[in-house]
Amino acid sequence: MTRIVIAPDKFKGSLSAAEVAEAIRRGLLNYRSDLDILCLPIADGGDGTLAAVEAAGFERVLQTATGPTGEPVMTAYGRRGDTAVVEMADVSGLVRLPEGELASLTATSRGLGELIAGALSAGARRIVVGIGGSACTDGGAGMLQALGVSLRDGDGNELGVGGAALLDLAEVDLSGVHPAVADAEVVVACDVDNPLTGPLGAAAVYGPQKGATEADVHVLDAGLTRLADHLAGQTGRDVRDVPGAGAAGGAGFAALALFGATLRPGIDLILELVEFAEHVVGADLVIVGEGSMDAQTLHGKAPMGVARMAGEVGATVIAVCGRSTLDEAQLREVGVAAAYALADIEPDVDRSMTNAATLLELVAEKLAREHLSQQ
């Protein structure tokens, strides 16, 4: 029996990774009903991370936490044994901004810290944090406060929310930190190497994507510098220039400073969590995918991580996507035998996104005719 593993990322703005996998599965079975198919949706550490680990068997633990602009949001973390997986995008991310209104100076990462605190209090001792999709540039200050770090101004009052408030930071007090922090192992899914501050830092590079003007960037960078100075004085180590400290508006920095966190490529970490290496053994075909396959895909994005691991066990790798700008040589170089794009059937982008599930079934049937007829 032909064994197939379907391991796509989401088609952003259209379908979740699980929905993509299910549509491909239906299309393959339309062609041949005797296929042995495993759907294993994946992510790269941004939005979709929680869904990926849930599909792999992690328990979904619901929790109310503070959203990026202070409103309560219903979110969750994934739990298996003493490992918890937290997705920053789902609690402190751009997708949680009310009506999409950016809040560059005031968005907070407090909810992320509340989720981590909740997981620690429930007994988790290994925390995996996916930090893609953040709405904040507060250096992880909100996260720190939720975990018991006191950030006070010159009058001894606790700082307000957001990166701009860090300009008033006068004192950091670590005495109230959550007791489980000392023994926790924290691993951060991080695919950028930016430092916290400076021209390549969190504010300068990513602040404008979160609504920061040129003047806002200067304010945020100054606040992040102040936070780094005070934390270095309290912890005895300065991690602002560690590659990845600037990830997620400085949440990477906060994890490094408080937990001594390890930063790892997102796709490698997610593949480990979903035990992809074990599932792919014996597979004849592995189907990867994402909405757009382009030059960025070649630099460590989810499909390439899957393709690399699948190639190691000798499986043929086929990509399914919304559109592809990669030629055959580029695909072969990264171990992908062929790519099937929805745009080849429906060139209109809006219609393609609206009808993505149906189009994926058709593409999967075509893929099956061309690659499974001899098996």
Image (spheres, grey):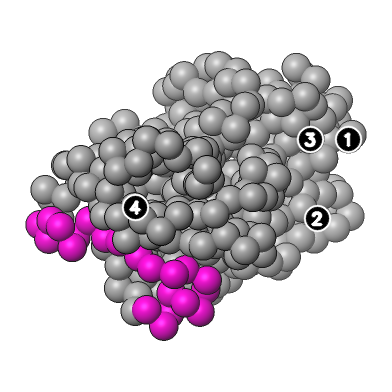
What separation in Å lies between label 2 and label 3 (alpha carbons)? Answer: 24 Å
Taking the image as shown, residue 78 lies to the left or right of residue 234, namely left
* Viewer-side label of 2, 3: 3
Q: Mark 3 points at which residue?
A: 126
Q: Please say whether residue 161 is visible from this viewpoint.
A: no
Going 30% across and 43% down the picture, which residue do you hit?
31
**Badge 1 element:** helix
3D distance between C-alphas at marks 2 and 1: 17 Å
Residue 158: percent from left, percent from top: 64, 30
Q: Which mark is residue 232?
A: 2
Query: Disc 3 residue type?
Result: Arg
Nearest the camera: 222 or 33? 33
Please tell me whether mark 4 or mark 3 is closer to you in this view: 4
Q: Which of marks 2 and 3 is nearer the N terminus?
A: 3
Q: What stretch is highlighted in magenta?
A: 328-348
Q: In which quarter of the image is residue 321?
A: bottom left
Q: Do the residues labelled 2 and 4 touch (CB within 8 Å)?
A: no
- Picture disc at residue 195: none
Residue at 52% x, 71% y is 335
* Residue 345 colored in magenta in the image: yes
Q: Where is residue 301 in the image (x, y as percent from the top left)?
A: 50, 61
Relative height, residue 204 to residue 109 (above, below) = below
340 drawn magenta = yes
Residue 182 image label:
1
Name the residue at 38% across, 68% down.
338
Mark 3 is surrounded, within 10 Å at the Cα level, by few (under 14), some (14 to 19) or many (20 or more) other residues, namely some
Q: How crowded is mark 1: few (under 14 residues within 10 Å), some or many (20 or more)?
A: few
Q: Nearer the viewer, mark 1 or mark 3?
A: 3
CB atoms of marks 2 and 3 within 8 Å? no
Separation (CA) of disc 1 from disc 4? 52 Å
